[in-house]
Amino acid sequence: MDADAVRERVADLPTEPGVYQFRAGETTLYVGKAVDLRGRVRSYADPRSGRIRGMVARADRIEFAVTDTETQALLLEANLIKRLQPRFNVRLKDDKSYPLIALTDHPVPRIEVTRDPEEGAVAYGPFTDKGRVETVVKAIRDEYRLRGCSDHKYANRDRPCLDYEMGICSAPCTGEVDPERYAEDVAAVHRFLEGETGVLADPLRRRMEAAAGGAEFERAANLRDRLEAVEAFHGEGGEAVSDRSDDRTVDVLAAAVEGDVARVARLHSERGQLVDRSRHRLDAAAMGDDDEVVGGEASGADSADPADPDANTPAAVLSAFLTQYYAEREFPDAVLLAERPSDPDVVDWLEAEGVAVRVPGAGREAKLVELALKNARKRGGRDDPVGALGERLGIDRPARIEGFDVSHAQGTAVVGADVCFVDGSAETADYRRKKLTDRNDDYANMRELVRWRAERAVEGRDDRPDADLLLIDGGEGQLGAARDALAETGWDVPVVALAKAEELVVTPSGTRRWDDDAPELHLLQRVRDEAHRFAVSYHQTVRDEVKTVLDDVPGVGPETRRRLLRRFGSVESVRDASSEDLTDVDGIGEATAETLRERL
């Protein structure tokens, strides 16, 4: 649309509150709200920003919906942005990259470290230091012996597992501990995770002192390290995170903007206790054709000029976040903010819903805001290899990366692996594996694997979100096969490959050599290596399950067959092995080696 087309459309718009959309075909480019639809949309006829000019030029029509009140317009805009994900709006994306500690909703609860707690589970966190979290959970299990197995394994055991023998589980599955005692242990763990550090620290300290007194210095040192992790677990600033005199529910919000990505940190306090932390990512509006770096126009910023190139400020981001986040959640009693939102309508809406909105300047509330601001600024710039990877490849920040590899033995027992990393950390719950057609063709195997994933995504049969980037283990051939699969299915996802020999990054536009110490290269290497490990592990399992002529050789049982295949890789290699090589395998004597050579 040009300026004349916008003005022509404006003449048909009412002067009432409502929501408008700039659309191109079936795609919504931008959603906005207005107190006066006609007056607001008119400003797009002469935008002062390259981004807005680019958006208007792409649009072929403007649609609108009238509402009774400004508040209705605010909520409708937030819901449309969440549902349509317009390219030129600030868009909220929940950040699930940090681990939580969860106790499951089960008569005999399981403790686990997870990023996606089961429904009904009691979760604590998120936490930024995964290593410390795992150390603390080990200490919890060592002291209170809570189970860590899946519900399926728990329900099907007739004798205690290895965890019981190691002293980290009390084996409630087989009745080694009575339910009342287990429930007491679970209650103690809840108390610790809610902030009562001594519940775990005190027994650890006693065990450390006993070990030191018994001259078990290595064990005492291990207990000391574990104690330090436990004591540091709840962090410092106790007066900020705990105030028993306060019985309200409070959300503390702060925003930080880096380029065209913003993050909002949220701290949640109940009855004076800081009980939850979360971080949320918002993608700012897309750039215009002239590649001018501009801030996204804040969702709901009716008072701001729609062509304002400075709209992507922390204040505008808070306006966008508040409307989208609370449009579908229960309101807290109070919201503490690092700064005033740019849109006064947002504050009016919250206060009309009974929410106290404050920007504290001192005291405990100010300390909470400082803590939220610190969380919002974390993982920015050079400390963010995921962001650096996106910049290097010229794509949006690839928070979700899936890595693919294929493993086989000369065309037999062919399998594929699909691993997932979220914000640089392995998301093992989203790992997938697949048996492929037996053939000795790496390119065809990769095409089949990627096509399988792509078809499931396009048809809505995969329960995982779409990836932001696919990484292929291989070179130009494997990358070409993967791109063919994507083209055939219509799954539009960026894809690159990483070649092992020289660690070259292979992209559709060419091959690149990055510095060996580049964090973005290290991230790709971790994803590639994990995909390879997962594929090889599955291949060994499948290969060992396949019936071979070895099964008919006297003296060769299932375990010996597995050792032979792991040692030589295939039946053909076993056939070519010498007697000396065969007898090097555990369980193979001279007589069995001779029988193998005769039979094969």
Image (cartoon, rainbow, N blue to C red):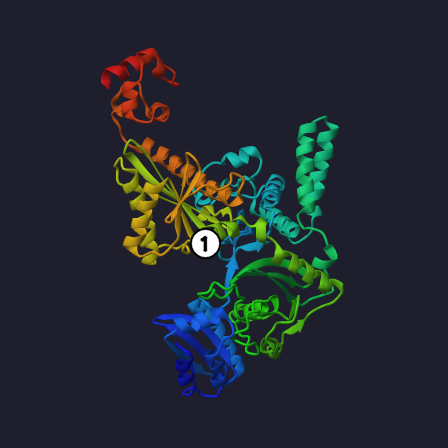
> Relative to residue 409, is residue 252 depicted above or below?
below
Instruction: Please tell me which residue is depicted at 46% across the width and 70% down the height of the picture.
Output: 81
Q: Nearer the viewer, residue 403 or 483?
A: 483
Q: Secondary structure at mark 1?
A: loop
239 displayed left or right of 128? right
Instruction: Check the image and name the residue furthest to the top.
Output: 590
Where's residue 324, x and y in %? 52, 69
> Relative to residue 34, is residue 291 depicted above or below?
above
Instruction: Please tell me which residue is depicted at 51% across the width and 70% down the height of the picture.
Output: 328
User: In the rendered image, is residue 453 in sight?
Assistant: yes
Instruction: Please tell me which residue is depicted at 66% across the width and 47% down the height of the picture.
Output: 233
What is the quadrant of the N terminus in the image?
A: bottom left
Where's residue 295, x and y in %? 54, 66
Kind of residue at badge 1: Gly
Where's residue 267, x and y in %? 63, 61
> Relative to residue 141, is residue 192 depicted above or below?
below
12 displayed left or right of 554? right
Instruction: Check the image and name the residue furthest to the front.
Output: 290
What is the quadrant of the C terminus in the image?
A: top left
Residue 512, picture quadrant: top left
User: In the rendered image, is residue 108 in sight?
Assistant: no
Tag 1 residue = 394
Q: Nearer the viewer, residue 294 or 455?
A: 294
Where's residue 369, x and y in %? 68, 62
Q: Nearer the viewer, residue 415 or 103?
A: 415
Instruction: Check the image and name the residue furthest to the left.
Output: 599
Q: Residues within 10 Å of mark 1 (few under 14, many from 20)?
A: few
